[in-house]
């Protein structure tokens, strides 16, 4: 079976226990305003234009005048008319990068197994992320079974916004789950992500019954979902989960802003301030005996 991936990030220490390889699947059924991986969120192949590499040599504009024109800021690309492969090939400075790859499960696992010594020495493994990796649950499940046959632990990073019947098989066979809670208030969740969180919260309860090692991730975006009452409500929602190992509070960052520009997209947020240390201290104190971390 083939799956559509964006990239593989090796030596990750932020996507589950130990040292891991993170497979970023393409496609997501949420539209979080702060998404830092738009190349994984949006469907299909993407063309990234790295303007810092562009030497304004005009090779692309001369070869494909219908798709590329030149401005003072660099190339202006009509992606509807552009041939991603040919543009990538013709640029001598690697300013173009085609994102997205169809790959067989066996081939993906073969690539991942090259790093098994790092997994085994750190109680690490492989994490499937996205986007929303469970949109391709059959492919992820096949890869997971192959990895388990080789003694590699598998972590699933999900927002849980899919019918339970579609995802319970994969979640029931994985070792660890990273589960995102972006807001507790449903109206707020819909404004920030374009979807309700009712199914997400229902699936969280179902997931707890599977007994998997569970890490809850709560991103904090100042001015959007940093209301202390909503944060406390999120903590209260997970406090009694039997499978809970820790809560990871993730500070908003701007590392994805450049990706939007390289994809020819407008970044939807502006002038977001830093997460206050006082807020982090207050919510961690409120969590009490729950193990918490701060990242982002």
Image (spheres, helix red, strand yellow):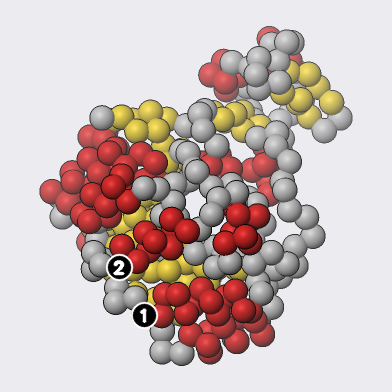
Q: Quadrant of the N terminus?
A: top left
Foreground residue among 290 and 25:
290
Residue ID for mark 2: 208
Q: Is residue 64 visible?
A: yes
Disc 1 crowd, CA 10 A, few/some/many (<14, 14-19, 20+): few
Q: Is residue 60 above or below residue 211?
A: above
- First of labels 2, 1 by sequence position: 2
Question: Which numbered dot is residue 90?
Answer: none
Residue 256, how many percent across, how many down?
63, 50
Q: Residue furthest left?
A: 149
Q: Residue furthest right?
A: 72
Identify which residue is drawn at 68% across, 49% down.
257
Q: Is residue 35 above or below residue 25?
A: below
Foreground residue among 271 and 173:
173
- The answer to which image quadrant residue 259 occupies is top right
Q: Is residue 11 visible?
A: no
- The answer to which image quadrant residue 107 occupies is top left
Foreground residue among 117 and 217:
217
- How far apart in space, not on screen, are marks 2 and 1 (Cα)? 10 Å
Q: Secondary structure at mark 2?
A: helix
Residue 61, how many percent across, how many down?
73, 15
Would residue 23 be found to the left or right of residue 283 on screen? left
Identify which residue is drawn at 58% across, 43% down.
38
Residue ID for mark 1: 240
- The answer to which image quadrant residue 166 occupies is top left
Identify which residue is drawn at 41% across, 89% down.
289
Identify which residue is drawn at 41% across, 37% down.
5
Would residue 100 be found to the left or right of residue 221 on screen? left
Q: Secondary structure at mark 1?
A: loop
């Amino acid at each position: 079976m083939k799956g559509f991936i964006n990239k593989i990030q090796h030596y990750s220490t932020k996507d589950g226990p130990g040292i891991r390889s993170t497979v970023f699947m393409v496609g997501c059924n949420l539209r979080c305003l702060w998404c830092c991986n738009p190349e994984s969120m949006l469907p299909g192949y993407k063309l990234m234009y790295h303007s810092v590499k562009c030497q304004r040599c005009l090779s692309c504009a001369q070869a494909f005048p219908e798709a590329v024109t030149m401005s003072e800021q660099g190339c202006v690309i009509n992606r509807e008319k552009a041939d991603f492969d040919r543009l990538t090939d013709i640029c001598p400075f690697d300013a173009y990068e085609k994102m997205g790859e169809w790959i067989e499960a066996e081939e993906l696992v073969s690539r991942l197994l090259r790093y098994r010594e790092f997994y085994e020495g750190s109680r690490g493994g492989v994490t499937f992320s996205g986007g929303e990796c469970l949109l391709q649950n059959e492919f992820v499940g096949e890869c997971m079974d192959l990895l388990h046959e080789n003694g590699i632990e598998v972590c699933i990073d999900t927002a849980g916004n899919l019918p339970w019947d579609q995802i319970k098989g994969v979640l029931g066979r994985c070792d660890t789950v990273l589960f995102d809670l972006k807001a507790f208030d449903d109206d707020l969740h819909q404004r920030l992500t374009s979807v309700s969180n009712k199914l997400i919260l229902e699936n969280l309860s179902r997931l707890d019954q599977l007994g998997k090692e569970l890490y809850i991730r709560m991103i904090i975006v100042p001015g959007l979902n940093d209301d202390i009452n909503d944060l406390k409500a999120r903590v209260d929602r997970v406090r009694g989960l039997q499978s809970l190992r820790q809560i990871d509070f993730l500070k908003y960052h701007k590392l994805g802003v450049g990706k939007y520009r390289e994809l020819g997209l407008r970044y939807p947020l502006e002038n977001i301030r830093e997460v206050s240390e006082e807020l982090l201290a207050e919510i961690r104190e409120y969590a009490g005996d729950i193990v918490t971390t701060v990242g982002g």
